[in-house]
Image: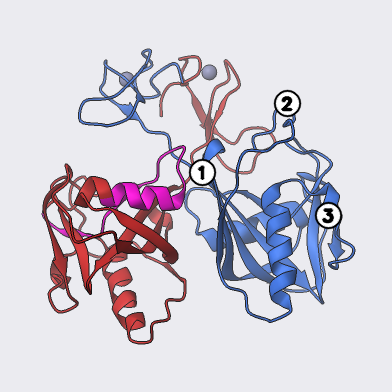
Chain colours: A red, B blue
């Protein structure tokens, strides 16, 4: 951030009066430009024991498999966001169920939230941000080709909890990656 | 948003190419300025059967009582945010426990998250954004003087679940207020 989105003048980066941490702020119009974590919301779309995964056609992690998930948009609920992403990425209609996994990724200012979900039917397709899509059993999931740590952890929790039928909400912190991230990968 | 925070030129508000909803974006430098929901995170700080509430000294809802809660900051986890807000607003150290209530407020682009919490000891005080603070039993809580719907709902769930000792995660949507909001009230 270089310029004030309110008045167009250059911003400062320092601790505003009465605050306790540095912010971008404007000493022309007084606007403080707060920056806060973003929510990535997704679903575990299930149909007849298989889970819908999509192959990413865009960076970050192009070519890797993911559960449908993306940035929550203004004006929607978490559940609406999970259903929208499932539609956009996998062309599938999902009845969003209980909240299931919640991950803190403080190093990239993100919180991931996944919901359990039942697909309305077996229909799915390849959405705009996908190059492929498919329905997978536990054995069929491309475990070494998953896009993000949040995806693998959510899927592992799911199949673990499937044995008991009890799906408690699980919260975890995800540390920075050890592998070198791709050039534009933000995770 | 009027100006591009990256290059200082005036922004447009329209659907960018390849997108499906209007955004602020800059046709000088190409930056799309995404706007996403913010997380408000808080705790239910408990000590010896009483709950810590703080009286707000700032708008919105100045003079009304709240659980410690505020906007999650970049670089922290949900749990760290809940502990920070408890310290800042109520000068109390809380051991943050399980995630408990999650509220969608799509009309103001917010998601509220409250955690169960045990205070480390009985110490508390009046933080910078508070004009008073106190420890309340269910009967002592100023139910008609609570700042936000999320506070009352969380407290009611808490005392309801306290009877069984089981605190399932609860997710709810909160509709727009029917009362006229205060001038600068964003809830
Ligand atoms: Zn300005
Ligand atoms: Zn620009």
Judge by depth and name the residue closer to the eye, B76 or B21. B21
| Residue B117 highlighted magenta (yes or no) | no
Q: Residues within 10 Å of mark 1 (few under 14, many from 20)?
A: many
The chain containing the residue under callout 2 comes to: B
Which residue was labeled with disc 3?
A: B143
> Which disc number belongs to residue B183?
2
Q: Quadrant of the C terminus of chain B?
A: top right
> What x and y, as percent, mark residue A51?
22, 67
Q: Which residue is mark 1?
A: B38
Distance between the Cα atoms at labels 1 and 3? 26 Å
Disc 3, SS: helix
Q: How many callouts does the rendering have?
A: 3
Residue at the limit of the structure toward the right, as seen here: B140
Camera sees residue A145: yes
| Residue at far front of view | A121
Q: Taking A102 as reference, is B132 left or right?
A: right
Q: Residue at x 14, y 79 (%)?
A: A139
Mark 1 or mark 3: whose residue is earlier in sequence:
1
Q: In the shown orientation, is residue B147 left or right of residue A119?
A: right
Which residues are the magenta region?
A: A63-86
Secondary element under disc 2, as helix, strand or loop, is loop
Q: Quadrant of residue B41?
A: bottom right
Does A65 appear in magenta? yes
Task: Residue A109: tell me if it is visible.
Answer: no
Q: Position of residue A46 (x, y in %)?
A: 27, 67
Residue shown at the point (81%, 62%) measured from the top left: B124
* Earlier-in-chain disc, 2 versus 3: 3
Q: Are marks 2 and 3 in contact (CB under 8 Å)?
A: no
Graded by Cα atoms within 10 Å as few (under 14), some (14 to 19) or many (20 or more), the crowding at tag 2 reads few
């Amino acid at each position: 951030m270089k310029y004030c989105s309110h008045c167009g003048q250059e911003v400062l980066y320092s601790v505003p009066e009465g605050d306790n941490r540095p912010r971008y702020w404007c000493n022309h119009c007084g606007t403080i430009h707060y920056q806060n974590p973003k929510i990535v919301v997704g679903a575990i779309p299930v149909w007849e024991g298989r889970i819908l995964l999509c192959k990413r056609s865009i960076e970050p992690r192009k070519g890797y498999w993911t559960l449908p998930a993306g940035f929550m948009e203004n004006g929607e609920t978490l559940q609406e966001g999970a259903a929208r992403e499932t539609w956009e990425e996998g062309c599938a209609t999902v009845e969003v169920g209980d909240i299931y996994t919640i991950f803190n990724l403080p190093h990239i200012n993100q919180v991931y939230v996944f919901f359990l979900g039942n697909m309305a039917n077996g229909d799915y397709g390849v959405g705009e941000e996908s190059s492929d899509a498919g329905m997978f059993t536990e054995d069929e999931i491309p475990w070494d080709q998953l896009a993000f740590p949040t995806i693998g952890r959510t899927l592992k929790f799911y199949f673990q909890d499937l044995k008991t039928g009890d799906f408690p909400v699980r919260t975890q912190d995800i540390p920075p990656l050890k592998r070198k991230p791709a050039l534009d990968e933000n995770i």
